[in-house]
Image (tube, rainbow, N blue to C red):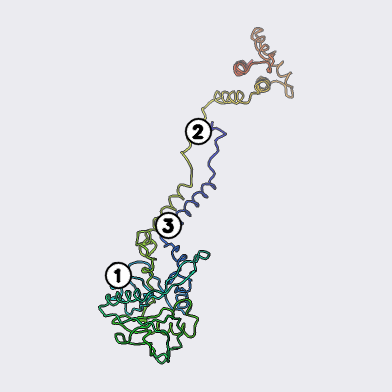
Amino acid sequence: MPDPEVKPFAAARMRWLALGALLSLLAGFYLLATPGQESSRRSIGADGYSRSAIGHRGLIRLLREEGEVVVQMRMARALGPCGLLVVAEPQELSKTDSARLTGWIESAPATLVVLPKRTGNIDPRKPNWVGSVEVMPTSEVTAVLDQIGECIDETAPRLLRPEAIGGPWHGPGEWPIEVELQPPFQLLDPARVEPILWCDQGVLLGRLGSVVVLSDPDLLANHGLARGSNAATVLAILRHLRRDGAFVFDETLHGHALEPSIWHAAGRFPAVLIVVHLLLLTALVLWIASGRFGPINAAPAAIAAGKRFLIDNTAALLRRAGSHGPSLRRYARQRMRRTAEALHAPRGLGDEACRDFVLRRIADPERRQQLQKLLARDAVEVPRAEAVSLARQIRRWTEEMMHAGH
């Protein structure tokens, strides 16, 4: 018989466990295949993730609100469907950065380089803002400009920092050119650059070989977009330079580069099909396993033929329950009644009458006395070990009487 204290594992609980395991697996794949954004939240520099005054997040948001497609590139990969590559305020380039930038400029249909001008220090009370801003020395900006010239095999123009800007701005007639910049002003010498947007003191936007250089980043930084017609001028410049494709802003030169890995590739087509396939297989295995939990229960033994099995099983139940006295008394009364009916006793006899009827039908006085002695024993006083034996004796005597025809 199975142990009543062993309970089968609940199917509903197994389904919840399977669902939890599946959700955990999905979350793990999502986190592995999705680049983290911690660097973007903590940035206060001159990049597209920065909310600080010198950052470019406002420009990115402005372009997207205007319906433009903007890509912030964080991996050293092909540009894809690029219409304009924007390299905004790079710092001093390493050999690896220079080689990568050279390849991008050669493959891009158009490139805009924005020279750096300011650096910021984190505000300890507001980690996403600058506490103080410093103007970069002219030598550091010139070094970046020279590196850009080396990437395109051009001699870089001289950097100018006039004390004031006087006179009107000149540029394409359809552009709003009411530009407002903050001192110190930063322009290019017109001797070695093709002017696009300029004034009497120098060139703000000019073409140098295959790239266009914006000398002063105040025009598009977060703090400058709201001044005058700066925002409209920036939109006009970017749309004028762009070819067919998206605006691609390089973020690798600002410390936001991500190393390519199999987990990042797993979130993109067609490798994502492999991930989906594995997830479906995992879900199928969990669904199949939800049918049972643990080892298979052994099949119960078949019930043997005959009455002996029933008697032994009843005796085992009596031993377990501990109420053998009343059960033995009731068993004796039932055997007497059944024997009396088999010997054609009158109908309606009570238990005592049935017993007397059966005893009178025994011709042998010795056998009658033995059966009477068995029936006369106090069932309550009979030890548990003798109860089964006594029940078997009563059954044997009554069976002999019914079969013998007494």
Instruction: Give the mark nearer the N terminus: 3 vs 2.
Output: 3
Using the numbered discs, state the Cα–Cα distance from disc 1 to disc 2 in whole angstroms: 74 Å
Q: Position of residue 231 (x, y in %)?
A: 47, 82
The label nearer to you, 3 versus 2, is 3
Mark with earlier residue (1, 3): 3
Up the image or down, 170 lies above or below 387; here it is below
| In this view, the mark in front (1 or 2) | 1
Q: Secondary structure at mark 2?
A: loop
Secondary structure of residue under mark 3:
helix
Can you tell which mark lies on residue 300? 2
Query: Which sits in the foreground, 121 or 286?
Result: 121
The CA distance from mark 1 to mark 3 is 30 Å
Determine the image quadrant of residue 142: bottom left
Q: Is residue 1 visible?
A: yes
The residue singled out by tag 1 in the image is 100
Dot 3: within a 10 Å radius of its alpha carbon, few (fewer than 14), some, or many (20 or more) residues?
Answer: some
332 versus 161 height, above or below: above
